[in-house]
Image (tube, rainbow, N blue to C red):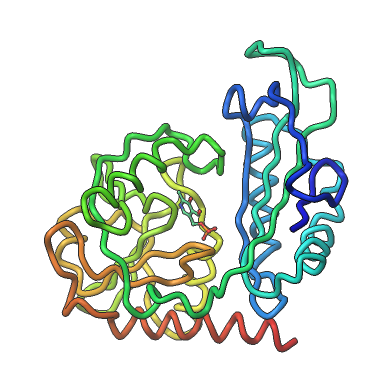
C-alpha cells in the first residue's frame, strides 16, 4: 500500500527516512491516530488541532502541507481503498547532525499511513477488556502526544505477560489515564467521572466527544480525579480512544467490575458514539 512521506504518495517498501531523523535519534516527534468509518474520518478537526498544540508545545514547526492536511489524509485513504480503519500521522523536525540542540535545516518529516480495520465490529466493544493498574512512571508532559512511547510499550507488554489486555496508570492522586486511552467511571448514582485535563494526561478527542454526547443525553459529567478506591468500587468503568472508541473494562487486577459484562451506561454511550459516527457518514 501507499504511504505519504515528505510530500509524496509512495510505496511503503521503497520509502526512506534518514537515520539522522531527530525522532529516531532523540524521540523528537509528534503523532496522531484518527479512525475512518464508511469513508468518513471521525473528529479529524480535533485531532489536527491537537497536532498543532503538541507541535507548538515542543517548539516544532507545523508541516508545510498543514492547510491541506485533511485532504492529504483523505486522498491517501482513498488511494489505498481504506474506507474503514485508521490513519496514523507523524511529524518530526527531520534530520540534523546528532547534537541535542542542532537546528533543523532540511525539510521536516511528515509521514502518514492508513490501515484497513473493521473498527465497528471489534470484539472488545461488547466483550470488554481486562486491565492491570500500575504506577504512572511517565514524564509530566503527557498532554503532548509524543512518539516517545517506551513507557506505554512496557506497560502493554507487562499487561499481556500478566494475563491482562491493557494497563491503567495511577499517580499519587488517582487514575491518570490508560496506556493509550482515557478512563471514565460511572458512579452508583449514574454520574460519569473522568480526570480533568492537565499536563498529567492526554486530552483525548474521544474523551471530549463522549463528554459532549453524555451531556446531550442528559447525563451528569464530573471532571475530577478518580481515586483508586473509587476505581475499584465503581459499578462501570470504560476506556475511550480513537481506536477503542468506548470499551468496557470488565476486570481490574483481580477484581471483576459490576457483573463482568458491559454496563448499561457504558452501552448507552457506546451506542450514542456509534450513532454519531454513522450520522457523519450519512451526511
Ligand atoms: N491517552 C493516551 C496516553 C493515548 O495514547 C490516547 C490515544 O492514543 C488517548 C489518551 C486517547 O486519545 P484519543 O481519544 O484522542 O485517541
Q: Quadrant where the N terminus lies?
A: bottom right
Q: Position of residue 72 (x, y in %)?
A: 83, 58
Q: Nearer the viewer, residue 235 or 17?
A: 17
Left or right, 250 with respect to 101, comes to: left
Q: Position of residue 209 (x, y in %)?
A: 54, 70
Left or right, 65 with respect to 111, comes to: right
Q: Nearer the viewer, residue 140 or 191?
A: 140
Residue placed farthest to the front in the image? 13
Q: Position of residue 104 (x, y in %)?
A: 78, 21
Left or right, 104 with respect to 280, comes to: right
Q: How many marks?
A: 0
Compared to residue 90, the image places residue 40 above or below, namely below
Compared to residue 29, the image places residue 204 above or below, namely below
Compared to residue 282, the image places residue 253 above or below, namely above
Q: Nearer the viewer, residue 115 or 215?
A: 115
Q: Nearer the viewer, residue 161 or 173?
A: 161
Left or right, 160 with respect to 182, comes to: left
Residue placed farthest to the left in the image? 254
Give the residue at x 38% y 73%.
124
Q: Position of residue 167 (x, y in %)?
A: 31, 51
Amino acid at each position: 500500500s501507499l504511504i505519504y512521506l515528505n510530500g509524496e504518495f509512495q510505496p511503503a517498501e521503497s520509502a526512506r527516512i534518514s537515520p539522522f531523523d531527530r525522532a529516531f535519534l532523540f524521540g523528537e516527534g509528534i503523532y496522531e491516530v484518527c479512525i475512518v468509518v464508511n469513508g468518513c474520518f471521525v473528529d479529524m478537526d480535533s485531532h489536527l488541532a491537537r497536532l498543532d498544540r503538541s507541535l507548538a508545545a515542543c517548539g516544532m514547526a507545523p508541516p508545510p502541507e498543514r492547510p491541506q492536511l485533511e485532504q492529504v489524509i483523505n486522498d491517501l485513504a482513498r488511494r489505498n481503498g481504506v474506507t474503514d480503519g485508521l490513519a496514523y500521522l507523524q511529524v518530526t523536525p527531520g534530520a540534523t547532525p546528532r547534537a541535542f540542540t542542532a537546528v533543523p535545516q532540511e525539510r521536516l518529516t511528515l509521514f502518514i499511513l492508513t490501515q484497513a480495520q473493521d473498527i465497528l465490529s471489534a470484539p472488545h466493544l461488547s466483550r470488554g477488556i481486562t486491565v492491570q493498574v500500575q504506577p504512572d512512571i511517565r514524564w509530566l508532559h503527557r498532554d503532548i502526544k509524543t512518539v516517545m512511547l517506551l513507557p506505554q510499550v512496557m506497560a502493554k507488554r507487562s499487561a499481556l505477560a500478566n494475563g491482562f489486555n491493557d494497563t491503567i496508570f495511577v499517580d499519587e492522586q488517582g487514575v491518570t489515564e490508560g496506556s493509550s486511552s482515557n478512563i471514565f467511571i460511572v458512579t452508583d448514582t449514574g454520574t460519569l467521572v473522568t480526570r480533568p485535563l492537565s499536563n498529567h494526561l492526554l486530552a483525548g478527542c474521544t474523551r471530549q466527544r463522549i463528554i459532549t454526547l453524555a451531556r446531550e443525553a442528559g447525563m451528569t459529567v464530573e471532571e475530577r480525579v478518580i481515586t483508586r478506591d473509587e476505581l475499584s468500587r465503581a459499578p462501570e468503568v470504560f476506556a475511550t480512544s480513537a481506536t477503542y472508541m468506548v470499551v468496557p473494562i470488565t476486570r481490574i487486577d483481580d477484581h471483576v467490575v459490576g457483573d463482568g459484562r458491559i454496563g448499561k451506561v457504558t452501552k448507552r454511550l457506546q451506542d450514542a458514539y456509534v450513532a454519531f459516527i454513522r450520522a457523519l457518514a450519512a451526511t
